[in-house]
Image (cartoon, rainbow, N blue to C red):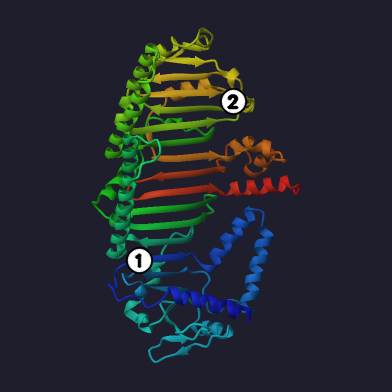
Amino acid sequence: MFMRRRLSLALLGLAILIGPIRAADDTSAPTLVVRVRSIEGLLNDIKYVATLAGRGEEAKQLEGLISSRMGPKGLEGVDIKRPLGLYGTLDANLVESTAAVLVPISDQKAFLGLLEGFGFKAKKEDDSIYSVNVENLPFPVYFKFANQYVYVTAREKTALNQNKLLDPTKVLAGSPNETVSASFRIDQIPDVFKQLITSQLEVKLADLEDQKQPGETEAQRKLRIQATKESAKQVTAFFNEGSQLALRLGADRSANELYLEFTLSAKPNTELAKSIARAASTPSLFAGLHSPSSAAEIFFHGAVPENARQQFIKSIDEAFHSGVDKEKDPNKRAVVEKLYNAILPTLKAGELDAAADLRGPTKNKHYAIIAALKLKDAQGLEKVLRDLREQVPPSEKQKIKLDAETVGSVKVHRLDIQEQFDEQAKKLFGSNPIYVAFRPDALFIAGGDGGITLLKEGLATKSGAVPPFKIDLSVARLAPLIGDKQKADVNAVAQKAFGGTSKDNDRIQFTAEGGKNAKLRIALKADVIKFFSLLDKANKGEE
């Protein structure tokens, strides 16, 4: 009785969602497709993740509970080794929007017996379509056997005409590593909905133009409006020029990896397609900073849209002149103006190329860090900073060691300001100076245990292709940073989970890139889940 009531509620929700498959172009791809690798695969992935998380026994209990609810014969007639899912279409008239659920079948007669065992008596009609009356549902649910699947829909059985049934081997095709995947055809959204979204954006923009924030200058207001317009432009392009949005969630056992991936494709030859193509992995000056000994690294490079860049420069220029006009000291005013003029070429270029890399821990249990930024006039900025040193008090001036070292033709400057570090910074980086260097095309800043070595390595790096945005974390190397907040010995737990830092099985990665499609991917090695599970148990005294 329990299972029948649950199944009735499921069918009620299903019937609200699904309906007749729209008699559009039979060869066109559906608007929405959702795929589950298989019932067996889904349960195996759940057990896999649960075991990594130290919940293997709970996973077995869940599996037993599901089996008990299925009855002594299980899901008889259902093929639990093949994928299942649904597909559907979106219509301008929402009532006509439809979907069909696909369930793989191993034995039709056994499947009918399964339904009857749950209290649902299927009636076969003259056209080989079955109907089932569901409690609290004002219309029957229809299903039909075809292509070794059962197609389920509602409201109108004509939707199950043979010429309207899509081939499951094509609709539900996917990678064996994908636990769940879904795709949505943006280009099939009815124009009426796209126009509604665009009109609402226009209304919001009009409201923004009439608003002025407290203390906001006219240039700042224009910058805010321009930034909002650029965002609205991207949203409009998404709906008008986008082709497909897809999601993939999977467990790749061969790579010991779990991943979540979003992709966006655009219609050919559109501005959105060109924008995505430009966001492909392109050269960054700092690609060479990547190292196996990195605890954390981040890369970011890209260009600011022309309109937004021009407005941004106007806003910065206004703010600068407003502030510099208030400075009474002519010497300070001159230095600030030189500093601004040295940075201005980089701002006008509208290109951002930056990276940061945290290395360690060292034998002293400290870290080193380096940050780098591409500049249009790095040596001009260096000259300004040399002049600026002459303006500081003598007691502070001696802490700034210009030309402390030379790497090739690049002068390295040392800042002996470690006495000003707080206890946490000293514990993390040790009592070490900060190093600054200006390569003709970039600024480098490094510090921590081995900072000078890291700076020299950074100055020697060559450009290479990297995604526009990338974060790469080594949990084993970062483990000591969270040790103070844990009762357990974090290093011992990390050793148990990862077996050291050389196996590359402790990584968490975030990447965003373009090319043929725009892609956002989050991936973590399976042992990362194991680490946090072991840490939780160790903190509770269970290990």
Residue 426: % across, % down: 62, 24
Which residue is identified by label 2? 429
Residue 366: % across, % down: 61, 27
Looking at the image, which residue is at 44% across and 86% down?
A: 130
Residue 160: % across, % down: 37, 81
Q: In the rendered structure, are the residues bearing label 2 and label 1 in contact, judged by CB atoms less than 8 Å apart?
A: no
Residue 4, compared with residue 190, is above or below; it is below
Q: Is residue 408 something that shows in the picture? A: no
Q: Amino acid at mark 1?
A: Thr
Q: Is residue 295 something that shows in the picture? A: yes
Of helix, strand and loop, which one carries label 2?
helix
Looking at the image, which residue is at 29% across and 49% down?
A: 272
Q: How many badges with numbers are in the image? A: 2
Q: Residues within 10 Å of mark 1 (few under 14, many from 20)?
A: many
Which residue is identified by label 1? 31
| Residue positioned most to the bottom | 126
Q: Quadrant of residue 219?
A: top left
Residue 23, compared with residue 407, is above or below; it is below
Residue 459, compared with residue 279, is above or below; it is above
Q: Amino acid at mark 2?
A: Phe
Residue 347: % across, % down: 33, 29
Tell me which label, 2 or 1, sits earlier in the chain.
Answer: 1
Q: Which mark is residue 180?
A: none
Of the 4 image quadrants, the one containing the N terminus is bottom right
| Residue positioned most to the top | 394
Q: Residues within 10 Å of mark 2 (few under 14, many from 20)?
A: many
Q: Is residue 103 left or right of residue 268?
A: right
Of helix, strand and loop, which one carries label 1?
loop
* Cα–Cα gap, marks 2 and 1: 53 Å
